[in-house]
Image (tube, rainbow, N blue to C red):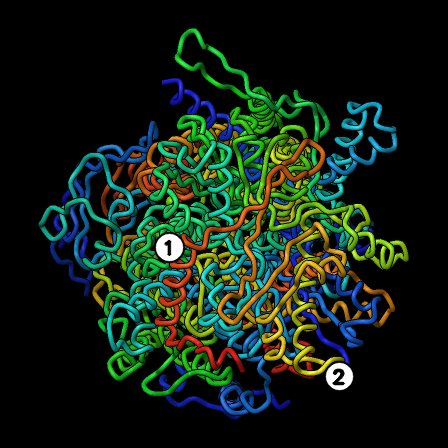
Amino acid sequence: MIYRENGQFKTSYLADQQIFTIAQDKWFVLGLIAFAAIGVPLLADEYLFRAVLIPFLVLSLAALGVNLLVGYCGQITLGAGAFMAIGAYAAYNFMVRIDGMPLILAMLLGGVAAAGFGILFGIPSLRVRGLYLAVATLAAQFLCDWAFLRIGWFTNNSSSGSVSVAKLDAFGWIIDSPAEKYLFCLAFVVVFALLAKNLTRATIGRQWMAIRDMDVAAEVIGIRPMYAKLSAFAVSSFVVGVAGALWGFVHLGSWEPAAFSVDRSFQLLFMVIIGGMGSIMGSFFGAAFIVVLPIFLNQFLPFLGSLVGVTVSTAGISHAEFIIFGSLIIFFLIVEPHGLARLWSIAKQKLRLWPFPH
Amino acid sequence: MNAPNSAFLSVNNIEVIYNHVILVLKGVSLSVQEGSIVALLGGNGAGKTTTLRAVSNLLKGERGEVTKGSVEYKGERVEAMTPADLVKRGVVQVMEGRHCFGHLTIEENLRTGAYTRTDGKAAVEETLEKVYNYFPRLKTRRNSQAAYTSGGEQQMCAIGRALMAKPRLVLLDEPSMGLAPLIVEEVFEIVKDLNAKEKVSFLLAEQNTMVALRYADFGYIMENGRIVMEGAASELSNNEDVKEFYLGLSGEGRKSFREIKHYRRRKRWLS
Amino acid sequence: QAQEQFFPVLVYRTGAYAANGNPWANGYVDYLKFINSQGGINGVKLSFEECEFGYATDRGVECYERLKGKNATLFQSLSTGVTFALTDKAAVDKIPLITAGYGRSESQDGSVFAWNFPLLGSYWVGADVAIQHIGQQEGGLDKLKGKKIALVYHDSPFGKEPIPVLQERAKLHGFDLQLLPVAHPGVEQKATWLQIRRDRPDHVLLWGWGVMNSTAIKEAQATGYPREKMLGIWWAGAEPDVKDVGAGAKGYSALALQHGAEPNSKVVKDILAALHDKGQGTGPKEEVGSVLYMRGLISAMLGVEGVRQAQERYGKGKVMTGEQVRWGLENLNLDQAKLDGMGFAGVMRPVQTTCTDHMGSSWVRVHTWDGSKWGFTSDWYQADDKVLRPMVLEAASKYAAEKNIQRRTAEQCAQ
Amino acid sequence: MTDMNPAAVAQPGRRFGDVILDLQNISLRFGGVKALTDISFNIREHEVRAIIGPNGAGKSSMLNVINGVYHPQEGKIMFRGEERKKMEPHMAAQQGIARTFQNIALFKGMSVLDNIMTGRTLKMKTNIFQQALWIGAARNEEIAHREKVEEIIDFLEIQHIRKTPVGALPYGLQKRVDLGRALAMEPQILLLDEPMAGMNVEEKQDMCRFILDISDQFGTTIVLIEHDMGVVMDISDRVVVLDYGKKIGDGTPDEVRNNQDVINAYLGSGH
Amino acid sequence: MGFFIETMLGGLMTGMLYSLVALGFVLIFKASGVFNFAQGAMVLVAALAMARFSEWANAALGGDSLFLANVIGIIGAGVVMFIVAWGVERFVLRKLVNQEGATLLMVTLGIAYVLEGLGQTFFGSEIYSINVGMPKDPVIMFEGLIEGGVMINKEDFIAAALAAVLVGGLTIFFQKTAIGRALRAVADDHQAAQSVGIPLNKTWVIVWCVAGLVALVAGIIWGSKMGVQFSLVTVALRALPVVILGGLTSVPGAIVGGLIIGVGEKLSEVYIGPMVGGGIEIWFAYVMALIVLLFRPQGLFGEKIINRV
Ligand SMILES: Nc1ncnc2c1ncn2[C@@H]1O[C@H](COP(=O)(O)OP(=O)(O)OP(=O)(O)O)[C@@H](O)[C@H]1O
Ligand SMILES: Nc1ncnc2c1ncn2[C@@H]1O[C@H](COP(=O)(O)OP(=O)(O)OP(=O)(O)O)[C@@H](O)[C@H]1O
Ligand SMILES: [Mg+2]
Ligand SMILES: [Mg+2]
């Protein structure tokens, strides 16, 4: 009975357009952010930061970007890894080529570069759609993989094709410890999630969704497909690019093109679909599922094995990990094809009706 | 009405929930006698389509399920059957909104209708000819992909496709929708014809109450997931409320659409 | 239990490179078990834990973080990608990285890369020796003039590492270097080998890993390129690379990172007796002594010896810290007598590291597949310092400049 | 018969303006299929212009031509006296042409409110950066348009389903939302493709009322395709009849009703 | 000249092999509207099963009859593929009737994981070989006509011929038979197909079986060429441009697409590659496919994408 909108009346459209129309939701999310910003740094250890939380945050951000394109605008892409790479390499180049370039600006410029390429690779979407487009975006992926490996200029002529960044310095704040890195990423994620949410509840977001749901009808009511699609590509690539810069600069520190391979693109698409297409929250769920679950399984299975007294070989565990991971994907999609976020909202809906079933 | 268990089709007090949370049918019971035409009437969202889906077991694809009650066809419980099993037993649904196979030609669409038939090629060809006779328009468009035919042509295709299965019970969901008046009459003539000659039974959800009651033997009126009224077709068409709200006839006969000046609150049997 | 020295074991037993990852991991683990069966390092038992990373860099980093939390004091990163990702981190965490036969070539320079140990040989060593060997086949390095050598390489930092050295050598001797990248994972090489058939290079260097190697050899067979003219890096010279090609790979040679397949060495016999005969072995028995198994074994041995050396200074029978292990690795002195004692006679040559030389030795020989097994077909080579040293210095200095690292001074080294 | 004196057809209290859209000799082919052959007719400002004809006659195609979804191979379209060049649908929208669809084409994943809000797209002026930051202008704009949309929601009496995703709505309500979305564009010409299919009489009466009110209140020109002759005869000012892509009649409802060609092809003798 | 012909031929042969994998995609897509990313995993599992069963059979037979061992291997692998098809229908697809393409696509990725895990668990993750007696050494032909002759691989030729036969048969199956029609109907609209009595369960099992058998053929050929090991799954990535270039719904398209991509990527790698540093074939294939799509959004032979209001 706690989770109800009872007694919460809205007296203006503004109030009704809020991100969280139910007060409990709002407090819950604000609390969560506060906890993430204050509580987590006190509680987590280095392993948690470096191996779980930072990748989770950065990939959530990337998934968020992909979700804007795939979930909101309906343009399935398998080239997200490439845009992460563009973001990372562009930011790297801004850093090494321009003296005194501030870190954050370089990252944002990385995003801008990714957005530019996003528009370029988005042009086929004006004609090609659906799965055809999805596969076609792989062209971007493989082209970028190749270019960053082959064209020395991008990597400042590093002989191996691998680049690395020096100290991270955001306006005097030396980001060094894992907790600081975590907070740095968290700040990005919170700000971008808010911006993304704003976009999706504004007219541009509705235009994207209209194009996604029925493009001819969208055009008939005056939406320009070119503008809607390309803006989705641009915004999505921008976010993904910034995430790529974070991945390279903050998480890896030093990377080669393989860090943004086609596997990464698939992984991001996974997150979006598992988490819930067209849901900001879903991106986080999806990232959590894909990042945390394998790690969890990897550590949990041997423990489980030891409980029942069998020592499973590492190979056995990783095969089991494959099987369980795959099965869980299938399981969750059967339970709720619209992703974890939908599952979450159904749960809330039930809670609202509770204790009555309907 | 006879005792339900002797019925050809009987729906007993079913409850349907979509998506685990949306309760749509709240205890619906109805029955269809062999060889009869039964009309299911009701406003938008009353639950007609849902009822038909529950009978033909097509709810799953919509993430709906029958949570209470039972559906029996010829004394057999059907809930556990697949739609294909039902088609084999002669229960075919014509879905609302046409649902033609867009990439298949009209003729291929019709032929898929005969998928479950085992009575040989010649018999299928014969039915195909019959359908073409019913709908000459389809014959002229036989080689077009269904997606490129007009709305009405698709509707005819959907009906024809169901007939190809040589059904015993047809669940018709809004057959008249989008059809020209002449064709509507024709469709119902076909219904009558099949009913009379081949003893095919029909359960039809229809908005065109006037026509529906003219051809039906028996009718149910649904509202808000419940059956609120039932009776022989002639009885219903003489009922004052039905006349006013479903046939648009008031005391002094049919009123011009232009003259109805006020939005009227609907008659609600329940509220 | 503080009385155990923890050895993290990064492995890839599944995925595209599992066939190569398994024997390595088995050899590594077997050696640790073997040491324990011999009473540990001066009484200090070894504990270890495997972490599967599927050859994916980010999973490798996760493993590193996880195992680091369990008090890892040395780490074998096992892929070029992970090495790159960890080079900075390890320095902060004070955990030495052993990259025997892989990793960054310039990390040989211990005064810049204080925590990296490309023991036994780097890719630059491999490239250098490969040219020496080809030169010898041709009857002298001067005969290389005008010859054509093709490098078929895995299109990744791993595959690109040798290029600077080969280019340097090409300038020196006047041969033509043709670069032929193969995209990961290397299952499609038809175009590559068609080019080889057209250009008929006199020699082909194969810088591959995993399935790329066997595919290359098969394509060579299919296009009729003589296997005798092919020379692989040491990661392209093991049983999985040629096994399913069988007779088609006959005559194919590869560099050996000192060792080859060593089923008859003493250490292998000891391990069979101590572990496998008692049913405590790690992988299948037939695999013991195979090339990659030996690679894993030797890698483990180097780590163990690093710890042992550290104990010499910081106290025998004690558990060493990362910094102490680094000192041990930096002051390794595996002379022939020690090697013989450990059962490595004939398997490898002495290794001696210093603060500035983290590689310790650059001895390489060549082995050849005779259709059923690998056998040595050359003398020992050693990389030419005149060629390599300036390159290492230059690359290390560039890195130092980028990262703002001060070269360690002699005093710092002495501490 | 083609060009009548507007005064002759004007009903008391209704005024007709000039010809707003003039279609001249339109022909449209799809491969071998001739959807429209040499059709000419015009539409005057403020009138309710009906297009009727049997299934597959080309009615929907005509609408598609008018709002730029199809490009006719031959013929001219004059909009307010100016020839219209090849035009994409969104340009038609900019000129003030809105429409509803025969096979409902709503944005399934969005709520009713959002669906109708998309109709306001062309009227929204803030840029993407302002929207991302949700600052003053963007927010005010959103609120202002929301108010307009709420008016439409009130008008169509769909307040209770404001936040429901349209995919889950029954057919009839979806049609209403479709209309709402078109209305939100504040169009000059509103094209309605069978807006009343699948509705019962009561609902049709409401819909007619909506249409007439739109016409009266906003002075919108309405082009209507409908198979219910009662509706067409009652609310339209002039009617075009198509058959097999050809025009077979054009005039006031009464004229058309008595045209023998029209009776043969479409109405049947029943009417 | 000789070299150009060789490159062409090499491209054609590789293309044929891509087609085999592409065919698996097309089959399942055409017959159920599912874009099956597990096709690569199916190829792997089929090849693994074949390799291991024949290896075990060979050992059991004492190494006497390679032929018999291979037959047992193929039958065993066929059974495995049937079990896969049945399992996929029973545990996955049945519960996902009428869902969107993206969801189904995702589910096939899940299936891919499961298959990869199970395959490696049961059959191991080493490199195995399939020896069906394919000739490996090249033959040089037309030496009289062209200087240096033209080198040809018999193995490739056999594989290509096999692929061609398979495709021909499947084309007829889809266009001409009642079940083929039913399968296409399922792809268009699950619910409507159910409503006319097409049993989705059975049709899905059939399609996945057929796709499994195609995967088996692909697995045997690829496996005998490059060894049976995990990387087989990646041939799927090379087959994707083939699928979209030819058209997702066209069986002959898979073949023509394969040939075009095969030839295109080989020619580009050999003639353009050296100018830009090489390694371009994979992206070149995708870019080629993309360019074709710009002119024909449904691929060369795909059914026109229907877009009507
Ligand atoms: N797939 C679905 N998910 C959720 N709710 C649904 C779904 N399908 C129908 N409903 C809800 O069920 C109720 C009944 O719908 P149904 O389609 O059965 O009505 P109907 O009587 O056929 O109406 P109409 O005459 O408009 O076709 C409606 O309120 C509708 O919102
Ligand atoms: N995109 C298209 N491609 C091919 N043929 C088409 C296309 N659009 C319409 N047609 C054909 O043009 C003819 C006219 O179709 P249209 O949809 O305009 O008919 P209609 O008058 O609206 O009929 P209905 O009342 O049944 O909706 C039909 O025969 C149809 O098959
Ligand atoms: Mg209905
Ligand atoms: Mg129409």
Residue nearest the observer in this picture, E167 or B37: E167
Q: Residue at x 57, y 63 (%)?
A: A274
Q: How many numbered callouts? A: 2
Q: Residue at x 67, y 73 (%)?
A: C309
Name which residue type carries label 1. Phe
Q: Ligand 4 sits in which quadrant?
A: top left
Using the rendered view, name the quadrant where residue E178 is placed: top right
Residue found at the very far left of the displayed protein: D81
SS assignment at label 1: helix
Using the rendered view, name the quadrant where residue A341 is placed: bottom right
Q: Residues within 10 Å of mark 2 (few under 14, many from 20)?
A: few
Whole-percent x and y of residue D135? 28, 83
Q: Which residue is mark 1?
A: A148
Name which residue type carries label 2. Ala
Q: Residue at x 39, y 90 (%)?
A: A11
Mark 2 falls within which chain?
Answer: C
Viewed as shown, does residue A204 lie left or right of C252?
left
Q: Quick check: is the Cβ at mark 1 less than 8 Å away from ligand 2? A: no
Residue C289 to residue A293: above or below:
above
Q: Which residue is mark 2?
A: C2
Q: Is residue D115 visible?
A: yes
| Quarter that holds the N terminus of chain E | top left
Q: Residue at x 53, y 72 (%)?
A: C115
Residue D46 to residue C177: above or below:
below
Viewed as shown, does residue D163 lie left or right of E42?
left
Whole-percent x and y of residue A167? 39, 78
Mark 1 falls within which chain?
Answer: A
Residue found at the very far top of the displayed protein: E144
Whole-percent x and y of residue C234? 58, 47
